[in-house]
Amino acid sequence: MNQKTNKKQRSDKSTGKFLSLILRHQPETIGIELDENGWVEIEELLAALDRHGKPLSRRKLDDLVENNDKKRYAASDDGLRIRANQGHSIEVDLAYEPAEPPEFLTMVRRIDSSFPSRRRGSKSGLDTTFICPNNWRQLQQ
């Protein structure tokens, strides 16, 4: 990877983190308010970012929404508003419909090096992956 690509990735990551801060935790940082469902007008967001020294083009914002690997953001169907999909520390009603949980749940944890490893031969225990179905005991019988 060349230096230009690395710089772009760092810039995208920094912009994404700031956008998460605004849309999930502190919209007042740039003087905006989210509605009860967490939405804000995109033009209002872009203008506020610009006023606070964090200019962002509509094209770049659309790219962040479309290509975020964790799908952190959503644009409204009409393309006029944006919100964070999850992880709010402020009160919002995302209006998601309840869903039935799957038969099996998968848990993947990163084990801290201060904990003993649960895998034979592993010295650090870092990045050890455990997959645990929610009916584990039934499967063992």
Image (cartoon, rainbow, N blue to C red):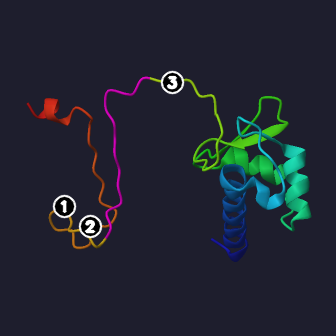
Residue 119: numbered disc: 1
Judged from the image, the secondary structure of the residue bearing numbered disc 3 is: loop
Q: Main secondary structure of the magenta part?
A: loop
On the image, the x and y values in percent for residue 40 come to 80, 42
User: Is 78 inside the magenta-drawn segment?
Assistant: no
Q: Nearer the viewer, mark 2 or mark 3?
A: 3
* Residue type (three-letter) at the residue carrying disc 3: Pro
Residue in view at x 8 percent, y 30 percent: 141
Residue in view at x 88 percent, y 56 percent: 48
On the image, the x and y values in percent for residue 130 come to 27, 50
Q: Which residue is labeled 3 in the image?
A: 98
Tell me the quarter of the picture where residue 111 sits: bottom left
Q: Which residue is labeled 2 in the image?
A: 125
**Eyeballing the image, is 17 above or below 91?**
below
How much space separates mark 1 and mark 3, taking CA atoms? 36 Å
Q: Which is more N-terminal, label 3 or label 2?
A: 3
How much space separates mark 2 and mark 3, taking CA atoms? 36 Å
